[in-house]
Amino acid sequence: MHPSPSSPTPQAADAVVIGAGPVGLFQVFQLGLQGIAAHLVDALPHVGGQCAELYPDKPIYDIPGIPVCTGQGLVELLQRQIAPFAPTLHLGQQVHALAAQADGRILLTTTAGTALLARSVFIAAGVGAFVPRAIKAEGVEALAPGQLLYHPDAATATRAATGKRVVVHGGDEAAVQAALDCVDAAAQVLLLHRRDAFQAAPALLAQLQALREAGRIQVVIGQITGVETAPDGTLQALALLDPQGEPQRQPLDLLLAYLGISPRLGPIADWGLAMDRKQLTVDTATFATSVPGIYAVGDINTYPGKRKLILCGFHEATLAAFAEAERQAGHKLPLEYTTSSERLQARLGVAPAR
């Protein structure tokens, strides 16, 4: 898999998969078996969707052939499975516009300015795009780019923190980990939360306590009520309300926010697709939506007897891939098996079975 820089000029694509959760990843796999290369778009900065973000360490028991695995473990297995097909990733961005074109292709644009002109689109957006919860305080929206980062990964956070006074805002494991990641690079690290209690693995909490005692991380208790900026928009300080209700001022150069994520249906409702109660209606033979070339799989769709299970989403992704392959070919295709088809084995990059 490899990232792709955003571009205002539309990139041609055989298929675009919206949503990089387990069903979206398996959709990439099934498309790859059909010889259809995929672009993968997700609002989060990493693949895995809610499996990776909300329950990475919780056990899952109903994946066929895998007696038990964690959410993150399943994501890692799926990443290995789709590796032969090298999908182009567009992470940390959300599809905000989608429109069918006169030639039958679909034009998509994202919040990062990426434009894709696709022969087919597979919406695997779950209950909506999982986006970081925003800080709701006066002046936050006007901050200059790069001074407030929501849920950056370790490399991005550390790079941004180098030599700066950093405030990490949040109380869960991601916030604690970010504070630990930044401590060697930053000039100062403060961990801001509404109370002096953090939800994280015991080993991380022990590291945090040791660094607090050494004076390398300071914990600040309070809530953000506003920001103070220079005339050029440069972030200078946070306005806080401490536990006693007294206003405080906290100087800083960089704010890293880890306040959790929440699903939002977002612009899907504006794409002209038939819906029922905020879910996309589909033909269960193909999982096609009301617009040719656009499919919906996983929790985003609805039909009689629908069950919101990962394994059901895998079934839907399989039929959708077959349907699109036959639509592009213009005729019905013979069924091939990975156990015996040299063509499928070649696509997977494995030696033919003997």
Image: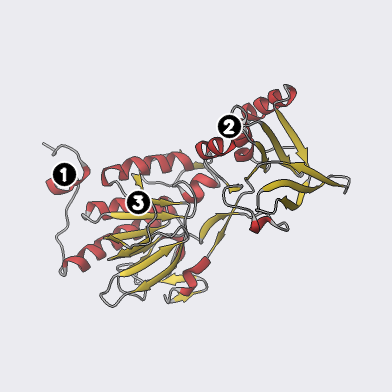
Q: How many C-alpha atoms fall within 10 Å of the one at disc 1: few (<14), some, or many (≥20)?
A: some
Residue pointed to by mark 2: 181
Compared to residue 24, the image places residue 205 above or below, namely above
Indicate which disc, 2 or 3, sits on the residue closer to the N terminus.
3
Indicate which disc, 1 or 2, sits on the residue closer to the N terminus.
2
Residue pointed to by mark 3: 26
Compared to residue 75, the image places residue 325 above or below, namely below
Q: Is residue 68 visible?
A: no
Amino acid under label 2? Asp
Dot label at residue 248: none
- Tell me which corner region of the image, top left, top right, bottom left or bottom right, holds residue 40: bottom left
Depth check, mark 1 against mark 2: the one in front is: 2
- Which image quarter holds the N terminus? top left
Residue pointed to by mark 1: 346
Compared to residue 7, the image places residue 248 above or below, namely above
The answer to whether mark 2 and mark 3 are in CB contact below 8 A is no
- Tell me which corner region of the image, top left, top right, bottom left or bottom right, holds residue 211: top right
Q: How many C-alpha atoms fall within 10 Å of the one at disc 2: few (<14), some, or many (≥20)?
A: some
Amino acid under label 3? Phe
- Numbered disc 1: secondary structure: helix
Residue 56 in percent (x, y) is at 52, 41
Residue 237 in percent (x, y) is at 73, 45
Q: Is residue 134 left or right of residue 274?
A: right
- Of 61 and 73, nearer the camera is 73
